[in-house]
Amino acid sequence: MSQIKRRELSPGVWLRAVHTQKFKSAYWSVTLMTPLKRESAGVNALIPYVLRRGTAVHPDMETLSAALDELYGGAIEPVVRKKGETQSVGFAASFLDDAYTLKGEKLLESAAALLGELLLNPCTQDGVFSPDYTEGEKANLIDRIRAQVNDKRTYATMRLTQEMCRYEAFGVDKLGDEETVAAVTPRSLWEQYQHLLSQARIEVYYCGSADPERVEAALRSALAGLPVNEDRVDPDCEVRLAAGPEPRLVEEAMDVTQGKLALGFRTGGQTCWEEDYPALTMCNAIFGGTTLSKLFLNVREKLSLCYYASSTMEKMKGLILVSSGIEFDKYQTAKDEILAQLEAIRRGEIEDWELEGARHTLMGGHIATLDDQGRQEDFWLGQAAAGLDTTIQELCAGFESVTREQVARSAQRLELDTIYFLKGKEA
């Protein structure tokens, strides 16, 4: 059984230590959490990639790799995520757990020190980031931004979010935009890096067999160089209702052979902070969140209106986003049928097997998170962004008691806000 301890290392710098004997590796992350803003998202996304290129002690990828090899082939990778309206940038790392070293070596302190070195002691030139590293990672990030259009399913959901939340921070992409990244200089990147170190809320995570007190001591030492600030910015997320009685339609034409229909719903204020959150989660699962859902079984399988049809939920922002792939001429039919499935849920037309199937799938998925260190870390980062300490087991207990009537009431509060349709150029 895991023990989870959370403590503040310094003002606004938090450690969550999961003490468990379950894994052969120790999983670490250090994350700087800052408000998602259009003008800074691209610069922030660039920072961990430039930091990962080298430190003052290990000034290039070759010497860094050698240092990791000495730690039984550990890995440290840059990570950029969006949690609600918070941009989270930093590193995720995996090292052999001390319990499994060949000669009883203690890797924990060395791993923590290397993580701290990457974050706080970068390779510099003339007092700022290396121009070569900055330019190289700018080109890589611009390539990643441009490549987002290649996966049309993901692209359609991204465009829906951008249009639906065009006046909200949530509409900003976690990677930023090409123009902002292209304008970055080694000095402007350095200044933003210093700003993040002093202003961002910092979440540190550890999952492994070491005692939390030892983990805390190692990280206090590794992160001793962090600026002390009593007023680090806490994560926040604005929740809005639908803009008006009629949904906004956005159409885009590209050279594609399959249409993408994406529908964005506001949840009427239902979020992870509300008492009815378990019912909202069940509602999404029954609507389109699982392979037993109404969208999958009826719109896709039974009626063959879509190549795929599913829904995802943004728990902090209060959104449910439907994603589907359709023939261009099936736009109206598919849209009507997707909305008809939601209406059925609103009327309480949910079979016992649908209700119990959703419950079983949700609980099983959450419990499976406990067997995956990366998913578990991502879950706790999301909880930190939301300011919640609810455990996976407590969430599952909430799902156990959700009734058909509660799911119907949750569905009744959903409001269609925006429709995005990606069609072919000749359609």
Image (cartoon, helix red, strand yellow):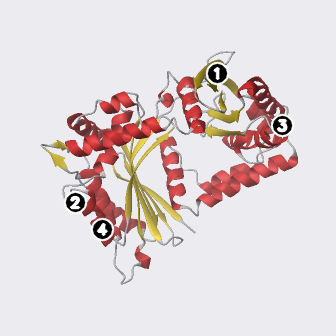
Label 4, secondary structure: give it. helix
Q: Position of residue 277 (x, y in %)?
A: 66, 40
For the residues labelled 2 and 3, say whether their Cβ atoms are less than 8 Å apart: no
Reading the image, the residue beneath label 1 is: 426
Identified at 49% across, 55% down, the residue is 377
Could you classify mark 3 by the number of other residues whose Cα lies within 10 Å: few (under 14), some (14-19), or many (20 or more)? few
Reading the image, the residue beneath label 4 is: 110
Q: Earlier in the sequence, mark 1 or mark 3?
A: 3
Q: Earlier in the sequence, mark 2 or mark 3?
A: 2
- Looking at the image, how many numbered discs can be counted on the residues? 4
Q: Position of residue 357 (x, y in %)?
A: 79, 51
Label 2, secondary structure: give it. loop
The correct choice, above or below, for 269 with respect to 200 in the image is above
Residues at marks 4 and 2, CA–CA distance in whole angstroms: 14 Å
User: Tag 4: residue type?
Assistant: Ser
User: Tag 2: residue type?
Assistant: His
Q: State whether residue 130 appears in this view.
A: yes
User: Tag 1: residue type?
Assistant: Glu
Q: Earlier in the sequence, mark 4 or mark 2?
A: 2
Residues at marks 4 and 1, CA–CA distance in whole angstroms: 60 Å
User: Tag 3: residue type?
Assistant: Leu
- Of circles 3 and 4, the one toward us is 3
| The one of 213 and 131 positioned closer to us in this rendering | 131
Q: Which mark is residue 303?
A: 3
- Of circles 1 and 3, the one toward us is 1
Label 3, secondary structure: give it. loop
Label 1, secondary structure: give it. loop
Reading the image, the residue beneath label 2 is: 58
Could you classify mark 2 by the number of other residues whose Cα lies within 10 Å: few (under 14), some (14-19), or many (20 or more)? many
Residues at marks 1 and 3, CA–CA distance in whole angstroms: 25 Å
**60 on left or right of 295:** left
